Image (cartoon, rainbow, N blue to C red):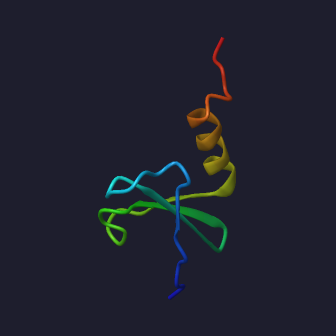
Amino acid sequence: MTRLTWQKSSHCAQGDSCVHVATATGTIRLTESSDPTGAILKAVPASFGALLSVLKGEIHRG
């Protein structure tokens, strides 16, 4: 089993409401700090990049 190295979001304040990101072979993984081994979202890099663009407001719908 691959051991994941989680990185805490740079936009996280202190507490249990933080997003953590890790990479694995061909996937990006996301979890929250309150239950880091619980729900883990998996995405391919292109989908994760699209998610970040939306969250940053870089994609505008006309």
Along the line of sight, the residue nearer the viewer: 17 or 60: 17
- Name the residue: 52% across, 71% down: 6
In this picture, residue 12 sits left or right of residue 55: left
**Image quadrant containing the C terminus:** top right
In this picture, residue 39 sits left or right of residue 24: left
Q: Position of residue 59 (x, y in %)?
A: 67, 27
Residue 25 drawn above or below residue 11: below
In this picture, residue 15 sits left or right of residue 25: left
In this picture, residue 43 sits left or right of residue 12: right
- Name the residue: 37% across, 68% down: 36
- Name the residue: 30% across, 62% down: 34
Along the line of sight, the residue nearer the viewer: 21 or 1: 21
Res 16 quadrant in image: bottom left
**Farthest residue toward the front?**
14
**Farthest residue toward the top?**
62
Q: Position of residue 28 (x, y in %)?
A: 59, 62
Res 58 quadrant in image: top right
Along the line of sight, the residue nearer the viewer: 61 or 31: 31
Residue 51 drawn above or below residue 57: below
Q: How many marks?
A: 0
Q: Position of residue 22 (x, y in %)?
A: 56, 68
Res 10 quadrant in image: bottom right
- Name the residue: 63% across, 48% down: 47
Q: Position of residue 40 (x, y in %)?
A: 41, 63
